[in-house]
């Protein structure tokens, strides 16, 4: 197992200025696995779903090389559900409904075959659950990356701090970086967050791209300017999946490899937002990815 | 004369989260000339000031190779004055006071020696004044670029459309591009604006960088992530000055040259915001610019 992923697998109701979709398959774990599967066929996922989950998705992930032995299916229970509405600028959204369901008492169990993964990606979840996954590993992975969100910063800051203290790389968006650090300047925020544990920090800025910080190095990847951002749901998770998938594929955690990983993550995210949910990722061809990577190069080369 | 600039030379009162400064020398023409002078010593400026203007600035510009024969000094009158206050995010500001003074009835006169300039940069001013400058040229310059702002889009849309129809390159910020085109997506906005006349469009996104559009090509330059944006006043003008100064220096208007010009403009703007007004540009050394250009390369190279 080269990449272990923990993250939700869920249903979302999504409303954007372009339309509405109900009971769309989503969840951080789902997006991450789809994105990472374009880079490495050696992925394991730890998650939990209700008996209402779409088992066709599990089968599709298996076909893509994702081992789903760590996905618990809770009979008689319902999958995590989120409902949200995006504003015109797509950078802000209102949560209309959150039903934890199976996530309420999720006890992650890492299957033995996944306990030696060298790359671990902790999708946004309770920091306690994220930590339980780290603690089940046989040895310290080469790179542990985690995503989190503002909710945990307010709801359980001490738990969050403990988990952040155990990881190598943290991914948050700009507002979350500001909230976590208490600094408005992202450069200062990055410096402060890197004293909390992670040596690496990725700050996601949505349509404004992403920044990668490590020691005195900073790298910036733009988001591809798109005609239309149809549905931003899962873009951050897709970015994370592409990023970690790329690193796991190459087995390289140098800053040079991470620069390329940020670009690959950004390219994956640029597809994700073109349709509702995982629709675009499901249909994506390797040749389209190659072409988009060339577009990224053309966008920033001078 | 390789580069002809028209733009205000003025005083600003500025309040930012970091401090206050009064009667700071400013104005689009001033920022543009300082920035462009780092690239070409062959600049002419058309502007108007009151007798209260700081003549030391005029002398300094002359020393930097800027011909100020086109700057009218109105005895008994006062220079243009603007006062504004920035919010914490530095992307939004409130105008507290605007006193047109000498700008109220500005009749630009292009000195004969400047009428053959191949590069013309029309700083943000009444579109009528911008057009009067174009009409005084002996022949069609190779590249006419203009800046404008939302105020003119509302106050005199027809005059603005006429001037926009005469230029090769338009520079606006993201909100202005949206207002001018009626399109939220910047890709669509860019396409629509390029049907209004300009073959090239630069969309400035402040701390989020700048986009350059031409035919099917798009180029993106990030803003340098800074510890602190001390005062954003004049950053857009400084960008424009660096951009056009670079093009005039190389006499090249290929898309490849324009990519580099965007980077050089961004580098100049990254200095501008480090201090109040033109303070940082006045003190800037060529070696510092070279070093910053290397930082830009490191920021985006992968």
Image (spheres, coloured by chain):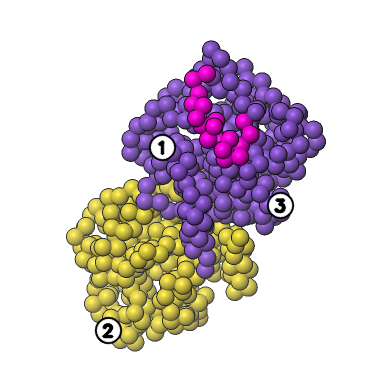
Chain colours: A yellow, B purple
Helix, strand or loop at label 1? It is: loop
Q: Residue at x 56, y 51 (%)?
A: B264
Q: Chain of mark 2?
A: A
Residue at (42%, 62%) from the top-left corner? A218
Crowdedness near tag 2: few (<14), some (14–19) or many (≥20) residues, C-alpha within 10 Å? few
**Mark 1 or 3, nearer chain start:** 3
Is B93 situated left or right of A297 in this image?
left
Q: Are marks 1 and 2 on the same chain?
A: no
Chain of the residue displaying label 1: B
Task: Pinpoint residue B202: horizontal percent, then vertical percent.
Answer: 61, 45
Nearer to us: label 1 or label 2? 1
Q: Is residue B143 positioned above or below A101 on the image?
A: above
Residue assigned mark 2? A139
- Select label 2 or label 3 by which is in front: 3
The one nearer the camera, A20 or B176, is B176
Q: Is residue A271 visible?
A: yes
The structure residue drawn at horizontal position 36% and vertical position 55%, both measured from the top left corner, is A187
Callouts 1 and 3 in the same chain: yes
The image shows residue A300, relative to residue A129, as above or below, that is above
Is A171 contained in the magenta span? Answer: no
Return the x and y of residue A193 as percentages of the image width and height: 29, 60
- Element type at marker 2? loop
Q: Is residue B31 above or below residue B214?
A: above
The residue lying furthest to the left in this view is A158
Mark 2 and mark 3 on one chain: no
Residue B249 spot, x, y in % from top left: 66, 49
Q: CA distance from mark 1 to mark 3?
A: 33 Å
Inter-mark Cα distance, 1 to 2: 53 Å
Q: Position of residue A266 (x, y in %)?
A: 50, 63
What is the number of the mark on residue B252? 3
Name the residue carrying label 1.
Answer: B276
Identify the magenta region: B51-68
């Amino acid at each position: 197992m080269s990449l272990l992923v923990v993250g939700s697998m869920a249903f979302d109701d999504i409303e954007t200025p372009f339309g509405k979709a109900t009971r769309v398959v989503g969840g951080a774990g789902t997006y991450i696995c789809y994105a990472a599967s374009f880079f490495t066929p050696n992925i394991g996922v730890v998650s939990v779903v209700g008996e209402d989950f779409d088992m066709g998705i599990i089968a599709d992930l298996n076909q893509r090389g994702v081992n789903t032995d760590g996905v618990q299916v809770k009979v008689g229970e319902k999958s995590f559900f989120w409902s949200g509405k995006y504003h015109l600028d797509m950078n802000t959204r209102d949560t209309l409904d959150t039903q934890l369901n199976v996530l309420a008492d999720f006890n992650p169990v890492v299957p033995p075959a996944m306990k030696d993964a060298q790359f671990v990606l902790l999708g946004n979840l309770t920091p306690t659950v994220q930590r339980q996954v780290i603690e089940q590993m046989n040895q310290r992975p080469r790179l542990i990356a985690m995503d989190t969100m503002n909710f945990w910063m307010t709801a359980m800051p001490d738990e969050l701090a403990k988990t952040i203290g155990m990881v190598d790389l943290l991914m948050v968006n700009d507002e979350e970086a500001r909230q976590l650090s208490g600094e408005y300047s992202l450069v200062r925020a990055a410096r402060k967050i890197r004293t909390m544990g992670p040596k690496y920090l990725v700050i996601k800025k949505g349509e404004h791209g992403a920044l990668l910080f490590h020691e005195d190095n900073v790298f910036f990847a733009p988001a591809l300017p798109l005609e239309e951002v149809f549905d931003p749901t899962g873009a951050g998770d897709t970015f994370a999946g592409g990023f970690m998938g790329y690193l796991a594929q190459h087995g390289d955690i140098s800053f040079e490899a991470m620069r390329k990983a940020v670009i690959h993550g950004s390219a994956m995210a640029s597809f994700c937002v073109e349709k509702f949910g995982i629709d675009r990722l499901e249909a994506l061809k390797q040749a389209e990815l190659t072409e988009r990577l060339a577009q990224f190069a053309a966008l920033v080369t001078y």
